[in-house]
Image (cartoon, rainbow, N blue to C red):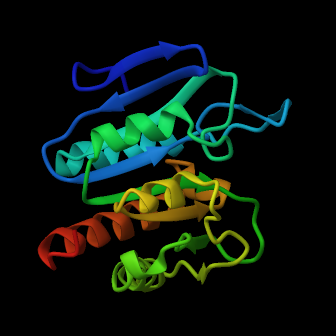
Amino acid sequence: MTSQDVTLHHAEWGSWKERLGTIPILFSAPHNAEQVRDGLPKAAEPGSLDLAIELARLFDASAIGTIPPLHSDPNWDADHPYVIRAKELLPHGFALDLHMMRDRGFPACIGTGTHPELVEGIWQSLESNLENVGLETSVGWPFGAGPQTVTSNLQSAGIKALQLELTPTCFDVKSEAYKKVRNALEKFTRAVINDSLL
């Protein structure tokens, strides 16, 4: 993943990688590294940043995601610098915030955030693209992207944002599920661009 188009950064709250693209789309992976939530460690979501950067490179979009060490939780702490930086990378447009969830009998869950009106038509496109490759998708449960999340914080700034939770297998590049996710997200992103959903 090391490349001139991806830069490494460090701050008091933790470390992250980012890529600045030319189109108004951002792929985010705030839990790629192990986080600290309310003083307790929370497991990393490996592969989420790799997928974010891969998609960003494909479309010349922007990407951001945490790497070790991380001393906080960008998806939980209010006014987190990660969110501030995400807004700088994407002042307007569409953001997809990638997360990992345990298997609950379906591989994908879309969170529409606290301002679902911003993503009307977009979340349906994401759902249909995932379902079309055979990935059963839940919307709003168990993760709706509550007010403290990166998704809802970006929405509060007027940015169209969705949270996408995927099971661990979906981030395993050797798995069939990964190929399906990669295919679905590529088609979805093209639809966002071509259908003027930004």
Which residue is painted at 52% across and 74% down in the image? 112
Query: Up-down: is 131 above or below 169?
Result: below
Which residue is painted at 69% across and 23% down in the image? 71
Image x and y of residue 173, in percent: 49, 48
Q: Specify the quadrant of the image occupied by residue 86.
A: top left
Image x and y of residue 103, in percent: 75, 66
Left or right: residue 136 versus residue 154 is right
Number of dots carrying numbers? 0
The residue sitting at the right extreme is 40
Which residue is painted at 38% across and 84% down in the image? 120
Query: Up-down: is 138 above or below 114?
Result: below
Query: Up-down: is 36 above or below 156?
Result: above
Which quarter of the figure is the N terminus placed in?
Answer: top left
Image x and y of residue 163, in percent: 52, 63
Which quarter of the figure is the C terminus placed in?
Answer: bottom left
Image x and y of residue 190, in percent: 20, 68
Left or right: residue 73 versus residue 178 is right
Left or right: residue 172 versus residue 101 is left
Q: Specify the quadrant of the image occupied by residue 5.
A: top left
Query: Up-down: is 26 above or below 8?
Result: below
